[in-house]
Image (tube, rainbow, N blue to C red):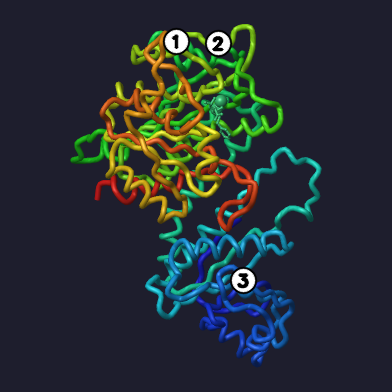
């Protein structure tokens, strides 16, 4: 979908969207349309339940007194509550309403709203961002879908004061959307197409944006002593990969001394059968998106590079397939991680932490980063605790945790801090090795998983996001169509933008 910004002149024909705030307060464009319709818009609103709440809309077909095909009235909610997130949601809802209506173009009039601090240009940029985010669709394998069943909306024209400023503000957001779409594509691909080698290739494609991409194979990982990651991979015919992506938005710039980079690490289990600790078959198909953490790290690197963020960032992803086979690791195997710590693998389905153990250690050891944030669809237990509303946040650093929570709040990707502590760490003690990969008991599954990870980050400020409940959505939200969500791309992009970029 093409998004264009133009000065505010209401069109005579086609599809037009205007806004109404809470308590049926018409925006200037809505008022203008009401005038052209000889009060027809006010009458239509009066006779309906439409109050201008942000979840409400009204569709007028061929409104009398105009040559329009459709006048779509979008509720904006309370004027004082209009902010960036609200405008994104409005944009998403507009796309959802019009994208599949069969029309190829639509115009949206964005006006200044009394009692709201955003300029029309800012509002327009966020509305456009929301519309674009909602327009995502993964349909490359649907060969029989009829053209008339596919979304037809090709051009969204946004009418506002200061279109040039809106265009500039949108350009940055558009790059973030590119990252989000890239991640959603990865998460949506089936595991026969997307496996460690092919996923690494997709990451490699970021080279054209200026990202340095290194790909390590099994041999190199053996030499590094990554026994934990390799133990998971050994049951699969697909060779594992470790991908290192580097965006250097500071280093190399004139007069800039390189600071320690920020680092992101992702779990990339391209399919998780559970291994010998085999999962039940019902719902196992969900485990195609067990690479979402890694997918988010790739999309984040794409967003940072796309918008030329003034930061040095490292993205590292551990890519493996967890399969049962004659070569698979067994419950009770003991592996030696790159850190030298030994791990008794009591459950081969607790594989994500084994992959991350070596990826985290490698990241810390090689890059000495300012902080490490890892993302992983790590535990079913986090879904029991937080459902599909918030991701679990675990951290050894209060400031980092607060910044992550604040960024999540701003972009609408919520996180909830969970505890860590010695009492939980104890639950990982093993009789046979330095630790076991699951706790002895049944409780606190997400916390003990995080404790396990913490053993591989030393004293470096670190945060772990358990995104098992957030990576895939069974229902559509205003800016997230159902399917792969790319949770974390927007959040971490914002975290970097607000706290870690050179001015
Ligand atoms: N990938 C799963 C976690 C998961 C579950 C993600 C549901 C998304 C939806 C992970 O590898 C796993 O299997 N975890 C086990 C850990 C257990 C064996 C300690 C779990 O959560 O059951
Ligand atoms: Mn598992
Ligand atoms: Zn898993």
When asked about the image quadrant of residue 15, the answer is: bottom right
Does the CB distance between marks 2 and 1 fall below 8 Å? yes
Mark 3 or mark 1, earlier in chain: 3
Q: Is residue 253 above or below residue 25?
A: above
Q: Is residue 3 above or below residue 7?
A: above
User: Which residue bears the numbered disc 3?
Assistant: 56
Please name whichever residue, 315 or 456, is drawn nearer the observer in this view of the structure.
456
Of tags 3 and 1, which is closer to the observer? 1
Q: Position of residue 95 (x, y in %)?
A: 62, 61
User: Which residue bears the numbered disc 1?
Assistant: 335
Q: Which numbered circle lies on residue 139?
A: none
Q: CA distance from mark 2 to mark 3?
A: 54 Å
Local crowd size for mark 3, using a 10 Å CA cut-off: few (<14), some (14–19), many (≥20): some
Local crowd size for mark 1, using a 10 Å CA cut-off: few (<14), some (14–19), many (≥20): many
Of tags 2 and 3, which is closer to the observer? 2
Residue at the spot 61% in from the left edge and 49% down from the top edge: 136
65 left or right of 112 in image = right
Q: CA distance from mark 2 to mark 1?
A: 9 Å
Residue 205 shows up from this direction: no
Please name whichever residue, 406 or 308, is drawn nearer the observer in this view of the structure.
406
């Amino acid at each position: 979908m093409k998004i264009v910004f133009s000065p505010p002149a209401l069109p005579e024909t086609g599809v037009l969207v205007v806004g109404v705030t809470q308590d049926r307060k018409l925006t200037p464009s809505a008022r203008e349309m009401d005038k052209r319709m000889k009060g027809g818009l006010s009458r239509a609103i009066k006779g309906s339940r439409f109050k201008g709440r942000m979840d409400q809309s009204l569709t007028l077909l061929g409104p009398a007194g105009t040559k329009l095909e459709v006048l779509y009235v979008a509720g904006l909610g309370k004027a004082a509550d209009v902010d960036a997130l609200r405008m994104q949601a409005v944009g998403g809802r507009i796309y959802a309403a019009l994208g599949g209506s069969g029309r190829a173009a639509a115009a949206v009039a964005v006006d200044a709203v009394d009692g709201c601090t955003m300029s029309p240009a800012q509002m327009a940029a966020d509305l456009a961002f929301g519309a674009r985010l909602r327009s995502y669709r993964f349909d490359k394998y649907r060969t029989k879908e009829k053209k008339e069943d596919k979304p037809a909306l090709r051009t969204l024209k946004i009418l506002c004061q200061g279109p040039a400023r809106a265009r500039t503000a949108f350009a940055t957001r558009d790059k973030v959307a590119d990252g989000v779409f890239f991640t959603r594509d990865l998460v949506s691909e089936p595991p026969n197409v997307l496996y460690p080698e092919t996923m690494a290739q997709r990451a490699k494609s970021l080279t054209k944006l200026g990202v340095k991409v290194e790909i390590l194979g099994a041999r190199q990982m053996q030499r590094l002593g990554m026994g934990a990651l390799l133990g998971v991979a050994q049951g699969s015919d697909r060779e594992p990969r470790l991908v290192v992506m580097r965006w250097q938005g500071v280093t190399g710039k004139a007069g800039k001394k390189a600071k320690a980079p920020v680092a992101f690490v992702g779990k990339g289990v391209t399919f998780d059968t559970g291994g010998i600790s085999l999962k039940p078959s019902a719902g196992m198909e969900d485990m195609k998106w067990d690479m979402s953490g890694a997918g988010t790290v790739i999309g984040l690197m794409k967003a940072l590079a796309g918008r030329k963020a003034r930061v040095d960032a490292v993205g590292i992803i551990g890519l493996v397939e967890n399969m049962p086979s004659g070569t698979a690791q067994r419950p009770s195997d003991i592996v030696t991680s790159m850190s030298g710590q030994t791990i008794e693998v009591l459950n081969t389905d607790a594989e994500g932490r084994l992959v991350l153990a070596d990826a985290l250690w490698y990241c810390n050891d090689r890059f000495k980063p300012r902080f490490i944030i890892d993302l992983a669809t790590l535990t079913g237990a986090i879904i029991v605790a937080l459902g599909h509303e918030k991701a679990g946040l675990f951290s050894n650093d209060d400031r980092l945790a607060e910044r992550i929570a604040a960024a999540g709040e701003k972009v609408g990707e919520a996180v909830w801090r969970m505890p860590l502590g010695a009492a939980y760490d104890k639950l990982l003690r093993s009789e046979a090795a330095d630790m076991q990969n699951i706790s002895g008991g049944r409780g606190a599954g997400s916390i003990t998983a995080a404790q396990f990870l913490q053993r591989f980050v030393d004293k470096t400020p670190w945060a772990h996001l358990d995104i098992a409940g957030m990576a895939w959505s069974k229902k559509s939200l205003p800016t997230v169509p159902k399917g792969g969500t790319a949770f974390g791309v927007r959040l971490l992009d914002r975290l970097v933008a607000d706290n870690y970029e050179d001015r």
